[in-house]
């Protein structure tokens, strides 16, 4: 008889692996299949940053030491569009782990837990008698679509992609950097704002470097995308010539679709779960994948309703916060004011990190402090 899989996960990145790992963690007897169009290890264009919230998710998945051999990074510098700078020690360290390594480790952890992993490109879906048929041959009770920004599964269920106004495009590469330099840098640019470059040291003599901006802003230049992205990266980081440059789209959370349809759950980039303020997506991917895996095995009769509840409880207030802040951040002056406030008040710096890299929200008094500074004029530069 043809196997009926309890969960079929499409995509082996952080969201997909988290879904598969959580399903087997909660129900070791569950039949879980992980499909990906590529073999692992494989590269993925990304900033490679894994913040503390992402490590919390790894611990929940039973993998607390998955990246313990990578150096923690505790220093972060942010330069606003107007040149306001804040440098501080983060409350909890971040890590930088190349996706070539990170994704392969997650897939192997899933395989070790009993998940079957196959190389397969999904082309069709059909709902049938409480199941979903994939390509006429794979039967699933629940599908977790974690197949990225250009998700095939999302298209097959009729969910729209993120609109262009809520889509960013970035180029990522690697540059040589002394092992002793362990500070992360985010350097924002007023031209074409919102736009910024980043430097995230890996700890092995290299750093992940890149530059990103909103897709409509890129198109408005009238120039080839490669020329703009590569040129601005070189302009902002002249001392760090980059190699292995690859571009990628980032569907930002204000443009997110419904989290699924029927027995199909969207997770990670496929659900447009990318922070609109920072472009961070690994934490959202691990979290949403975990919640999708939970829903699939704990609520098999209606996994989508359970998944929605889980997302609402974990990210509801946070996403409303980032939706509002993304609108305010269209003004570079607002960001200047926020960074200037963070330079004077450590608790504001910590809060910005929580909102940009985790699931933080903004208390009204702190929001008013930033807005007041924004309305009263341009902040002074801090060095």
Image (cartoon, helix red, strand yellow):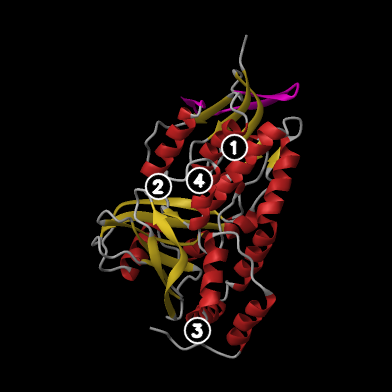
Above or below, 76 relative to 99: below
137 relative to 63 in the view: left or right: right
Q: Secondary structure at mark 2?
A: loop
CA distance for labels 4 and 2: 9 Å
Label 1 vs label 3, nearer the camera? 3
Residue under the image location 43 percent in, 86 percent down: 381
Q: Nearer the viewer, residue 271 or 66?
A: 66
Q: Callout 1 environment at 10 Å: few (<14), some (14 to 19), or many (20+)?
A: many
Q: Which mark is residue 28?
A: none
Depth order, front residue of 211/36 = 36
User: Which of the two discs, 2 and 1, sits closer to the camera?
Assistant: 2
The residue carrying pointer 3 sits among few (fewer than 14), some (14 to 19) or many (20 or more) residues within 10 Å by Cα, namely few
Q: Quadrant of the C terminus?
A: bottom left
Residue under label 1: 145
**Could one spot residue 197 in this view of the protein?**
yes
Label ID, residue 344: 3
Marks 4 & 2, CB-CB < 8 Å contact: yes
- Read off the residue under disc 2: 67
Cα distance between the residues tagged 3 and 2: 33 Å
> Which quarter of the rendered picture does the N terminus lie within?
top right
Left or right: residue 271 compared with residue 344: right
Vertical relation: 267 (above or below) 25: below
Q: Which image quadrant for residue 236?
A: bottom left
The numbered mark, 1 or 4, whose residue comes first in the sequence reads 4
User: Looking at the rendering, which quadrant does residue 372 occupy?
Assistant: bottom right
Q: What residue span does the magenta drawing correspond to?
A: 114-134
Classify mark 4: helix, strand or loop. helix
- Mark 2 is surrounded, within 10 Å at the Cα level, by few (under 14), some (14 to 19) or many (20 or more) other residues, namely some
SS category of the residue bearing label 3: helix
Q: What's the CA distance linking mark 1 and mark 4?
A: 20 Å
Mark 3 or mark 2, which has the lower sequence index? Answer: 2
Q: Which residue is mark 4?
A: 58
């Amino acid at each position: 008889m043809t196997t009926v899989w309890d969960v079929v996960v499409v995509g082996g990145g952080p969201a997909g692996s988290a879904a598969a790992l959580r399903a087997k963690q909660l129900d070791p007897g569950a039949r879980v299949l992980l499909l990906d169009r590529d073999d692992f290890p494989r590269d993925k264009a990304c900033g490679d940053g894994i913040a503390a919230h992402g490590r919390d998710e790894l611990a929940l998945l039973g993998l607390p030491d998955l990246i313990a051999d990578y150096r923690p990074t505790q220093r972060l510098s942010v330069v606003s569009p107007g040149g306001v700078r804040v440098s501080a020690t983060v409350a909890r360290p971040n890590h930088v782990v190349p996706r070539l390594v990170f994704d392969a480790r997650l897939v192997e952890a899933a395989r070790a837990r009993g998940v079957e992993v196959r190389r397969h490109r999904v082309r069709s879906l059909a709902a049938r008698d409480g199941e979903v048929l994939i390509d006429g041959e794979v039967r699933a009770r629940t599908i977790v679509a974690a197949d990225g920004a250009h998700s095939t599964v999302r298209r097959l269920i009729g969910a729209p992609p993120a609109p262009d106004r809520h889509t960013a495009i970035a180029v990522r590469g690697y540059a040589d950097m002394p092992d002793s330099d362990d500070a992360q840098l985010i350097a924002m640019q007023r031209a074409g704002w919102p736009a910024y470059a980043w430097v995230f040291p890996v700890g092995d003599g290299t750093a992940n470097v890149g530059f990103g901006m909103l897709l409509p802003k890129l198109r408005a230049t009238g120039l080839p995308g490669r020329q703009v992205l590569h040129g601005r990266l070189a302009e902002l980081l002249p001392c760090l010539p980059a190699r292995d440059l690859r571009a990628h789209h980032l569907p930002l959370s204000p443009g997110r679709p419904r989290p699924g349809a029927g027995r199909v759950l969207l997770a990670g980039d496929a659900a447009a779960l990318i922070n609109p303020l920072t472009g961070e997506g690994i934490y959202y991917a691990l979290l949403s994948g975990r919640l999708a895996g939970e829903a699939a095995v704990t609520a098999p009769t209606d996994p989508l309703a359970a998944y929605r509840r889980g997302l609402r409880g974990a990210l509801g207030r946070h996403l409303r916060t980032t939706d509002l802040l993304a609108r305010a951040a269209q003004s570079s002056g607002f960001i200047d004011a926020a960074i200037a406030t963070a330079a004077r008040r450590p608790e504001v710096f910590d809060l910005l990190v929580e909102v940009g890299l985790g699931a933080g929200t903004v208390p009204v008094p702190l929001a008013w402090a930033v807005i007041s500074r924004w309305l009263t004029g341009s902040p002074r530069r801090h060095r």
